[in-house]
Amino acid sequence: MDLFIDVILNSFTVSIVLIILLGFIPFYFFNRKFVGFVCWLLGLCLLTFFLSFQYNLSIFLLVIISSISGAFAILYNYAFKIPKVVHDCGLLNVIYSYRDTSCFKNNNKKIIDRNKKDELDSPHVGIIIAKKKGFLRDIDKNVYADGIDLLVEFLLRRSIQFNIYECGTPQSAIKVINNPNTCSLFIFGHGTKCSLYFGRNGLLNYCEVRNAPKKKIIAQLHCNSNEECGCSLADYILDDDGIKFIIDGYRCVHQNRTDLEKFLSDNDNELEILLRSS
C-alpha cells in the first residue's frame, strides 16, 4: 500500500512539473498565451488518465506529449515566417545575424545606457528602441545588436546631439514622436511598414501619429513587412526635402547593420547638413 501511494505521489509530482513546463515554453519564451493555455489544459485533462497507468509509462507518455507540444509551439511561431525571412533577408544574412547578435548585443546595451539622457529640451536626433514585453520580462533583447552602435558612433563623431529612448509601450513612443525637439527619428524594434510592436503591451499604428511634427530624417530599422497594410511613418510626417530609410520586407540583425552602415556612408554629407540644421 505504501509503495502504491509513493508511486502515485511521485507520478503526480513529475506529471505536474512536466505539464507546467510544456505550457511554459510557448507561454514565456514565445509569448504565445493561447498555445500555452491549450498545452496546460491538454496536460491537465490527460493527467488523470496517465495516473491510471504504471509509473514509467505515465512519465514516458508525458515526456512525449511535452516534446510534441514544444515543437508545436515553435512551428506555430515560426513555420510561416522563416521562409519569408530567408527570402527577404537572404540565408547568409540570417546565419550571420546569430553571430552579430552574440557579438554586439551586450556591448550595445552598455553603449545605450552610457548615452541615454532623461530629457532633452533642445532639437536633437531621437533614437527609439521599442522593447517587446513578454509574460514576466522584456524579451528579444537581440534588437540591441541591430546597429545602434553604428548610429551612435556616427553622431558622436560629428558632435550631433541625440538621445536614446527605450520605449516599452505605444504611449511612450508616441510621446517621443510628438516631441517637437526630436527633429529626426531612427526606430529600432519589431513591426511592420505601418506599425511598431511592443509585445504584450500592444501595437502602435503609425496613422495614430499622422499629425506629429515633421521630421527631417526617418529610418524604420525594424521589419517593414505587410506592405499593403498602410503608410509608413515617413509617409505621414517626413519633411518634403527629408530623407527616409525604409526597406520593405522582413529584416534581420546582420542585414540591418550592413544596410544602416551603407546608408550612413552614402548619405554622409547630406545627413550631416540636415542633422545640424535641426
Image (cartoon, rainbow, N blue to C red):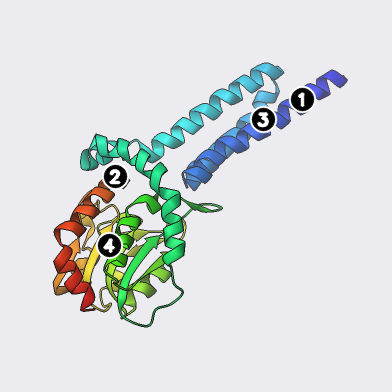
Secondary element at image label 3: helix
Q: Nearer the viewer, residue 51 or 145?
A: 145
Location of residue 105 in the rendering, given as x and y in whole percent from the top left corner: 42, 49
The correct choice, above or below, for 199 with respect to 45 in the image is below
Q: Quadrant of the N terminus?
A: top right
Q: Which residue is the site of mark 1?
A: 8
Secondary element at image label 1: helix
Where is residue 87, by image quadrant?
top left
Q: Nearer the viewer, residue 143 or 53?
A: 143
Does label 1 or label 4 sit earlier along the sequence?
1
Q: CA distance from mark 2 to mark 3?
A: 42 Å
Q: Quadrant of the C terminus?
A: bottom left
Q: Are marks 1 and 2 in contact (CB under 8 Å)?
A: no
Q: Which residue is the site of mark 3?
A: 15
Where is residue 235, by image quadrant?
bottom left
- Asked whether the viewer can see residue 174, the reply is yes
Say which amino acid is labelled 1.
Answer: Ile
Does label 1 or label 3 sit earlier along the sequence?
1
Name the residue rendered at 54%, 37% in the picture: 39
Position of 90 with respect to 50 (left or right) is: left
Q: Nearer the viewer, residue 224 or 6?
A: 224
Q: Are marks 2 and 3 in contact (CB under 8 Å)?
A: no
Q: CA distance from mark 4 to mark 3?
A: 55 Å
Location of residue 193 in the rendering, given as x and y in whole percent from the top left corner: 25, 57
Residue placed farthest to the left in the image?
Answer: 241
